[in-house]
């Protein structure tokens, strides 16, 4: 009930990632350079080492093609020879290690751009790679399989990989090597939605009726709502949703309140931010794809709707909005700050009487 009153689209928001360092670091590693691919042309005694030999072969190595046996030639066999003659290891095309690089948590990130195309070849190389990474005492393995390599998914699952998450262009799988509970972070746990409380100088609220909704809520006039898209600020998302659904330009004022619910869509938790906005235009242009109708409704009439009047949570939100209009309450305003932890600019939402409405409580 509470969710529907705030808007059915609020549960379709984009996911929040974990804030733990392991999660962000593991995925940010994909942006790093991937090094040279294992190749018969690579030969180095001191310098660039083929990726397969990064952690298992010393600097004094040289890669040479073995041509003494016809069988070896047919299978593209290469011998990695220690210059000091201490040892040698034989690698064939199907017993090499998948191109990868290590993250800062002793994990492995497989290069998705250099995966074998042949499923049987991939299966053989994957098994050999797992043995190799165990010997390196690696921990978590991140295997990103693009859509064009979808046939490799069941092979990885058969070897013990688990689904982590999926996007339109790929599926991410993980593998935890140590004989202990996995420390790899899970997939995103939340959706993020926004609602715009837009009220004009005549105490009229901008409301909409959605084209597709539960029959129990047919005829309900509600706030424009939507979901935050990837890399979008909460306050920008609220302004955008109001514009898309009603055609009204608005200015963000404050976050009035937010609702935290659990086991909503796809058993995920849900965060819904109610934002107060100031209208800059009044003309309404309805989004025909999602919205049945939109209008400016007197605040008193809006509050008296049976479905709103009978819902304790939504009634509380409206009471808070009214208190804000009366200067009896202050919401949260975003402040752009840079953290030394990641060097990035973030929005910190808090009440700041020095920079917000001078007529707000406490001034």
Image: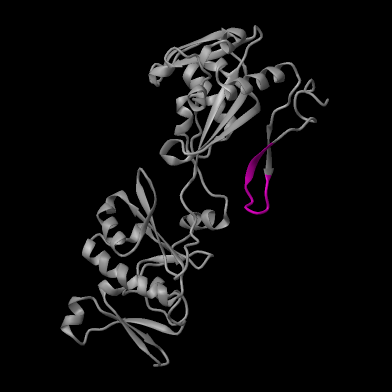
The picture quadrant where one finds residue 337 is top right
Spot occupied by residue 9 in the image (x, y as percentages of width and height): 45, 27
Magenta stretch bounds: 338-349
Residue closer to the observer: 104 or 305: 305
Residue 98 as seen in the image, left or right of residue 276: left
Looking at the picture, how far across and down is residue 99, in whole percent?
Answer: 37, 66
Task: Determine if the magenta segment contains residue 253.
Answer: no
Of 327 and 229, which appears nearest the observer?
Answer: 327
Residue 295 in the figure: left or right of residue 326: left
Residue 301 place in picture, x, y as percent: 58, 7
Q: Is residue 123 above or below residue 270?
A: below
Name above or below for residue 228 compared with residue 320.
below
Is 341 one of the magenta-colored residues? yes
Against 258, is 102 above or below? below
Marks counted in the figure total 0
Measuring 25% from the left and 59% from the top, which residue is drawn there? 117
- Across and down, in percent, residue 211 comes to 39, 17
Q: Residue at x 31, y 61 (%)?
A: 156
Residue 167 location, quadrant: top left
* Residue at point 49%, 58% (across, down): 26
Q: Which of the two residues, 263 or 16, is positioned nearer the viewer here? A: 263
In this view, which residue lies farthest toward the left? 70
Coloring scheme used: one colour
- Residue 44 appears anywhere in the view: yes
Residue at (39%, 21%) from the top-left corner?
214
User: In this picture, is 164 found above or below 41?
Assistant: above
* Position of residue 90 in the picture relative to residue 354 (left or right): left
Which residue of the protein is positioned furthest toward the right in this rendering? 363
């Amino acid at each position: 009930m509470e969710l529907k009153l705030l808007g059915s689209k609020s549960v379709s928001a984009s996911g929040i990632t974990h804030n733990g360092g392991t999660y962000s670091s593991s995925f940010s590693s994909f942006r790093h350079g991937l090094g040279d691919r294992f190749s018969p042309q690579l030969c180095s005694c001191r310098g660039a080492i083929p990726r397969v030999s990064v952690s298992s072969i010393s600097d004094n190595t040289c890669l040479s093609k073995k041509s003494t046996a016809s069988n070896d030639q047919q299978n593209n066999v290469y011998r990695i020879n220690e210059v000091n003659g201490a040892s040698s290891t034989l690698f064939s095309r199907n017993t090499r290690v998948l191109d990868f690089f290590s993250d800062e948590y002793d994990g492995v990130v497989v290069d998705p751009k250099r995966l074998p195309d042949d499923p049987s070849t991939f299966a053989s190389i994957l098994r050999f790679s797992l043995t190799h990474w165990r010997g390196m005492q690696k921990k978590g393995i991140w295997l990103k399989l693009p859509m064009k390599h979808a046939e490799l998914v069941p092979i990885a699952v058969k070897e013990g990989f688990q689904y982590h998450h999926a996007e339109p262009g790929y599926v991410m799988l993980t593998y935890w090597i140590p004989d202990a509970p996995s420390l790899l972070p899970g997939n995103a746990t939340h959706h993020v939605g926004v609602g715009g409380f837009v009220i004009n100088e005549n105490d009229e609220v901008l409301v909409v009726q959605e084209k597709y909704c539960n029959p129990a809520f047919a005829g309900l006039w509600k706030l424009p709502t939507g979901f935050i898209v990837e890399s979008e600020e909460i306050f920008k998302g609220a302004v955008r949703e109001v514009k898309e659904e009603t055609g009204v330009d608005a200015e963000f004022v404050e976050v009035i309140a937010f609702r935290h619910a659990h086991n909503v869509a796809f058993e995920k938790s849900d965060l819904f931010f109610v934002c107060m906005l100031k209208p800059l235009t009044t003309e309404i242009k309805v989004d025909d794809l999602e919205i049945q109708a939109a209008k400016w409704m007197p605040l008193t009439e809006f509050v008296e709707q049976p479905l709103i009047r009978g819902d304790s949570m939504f009634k509380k939100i409206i009471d808070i909005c009214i208190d804000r209009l009366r200067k009896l309450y202050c919401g949260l305003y975003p402040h752009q700050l840079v953290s030394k932890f990641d060097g990035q600019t973030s929005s910190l939402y808090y009440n700041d009487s020095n920079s917000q409405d001078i007529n707000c409580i406490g001034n």
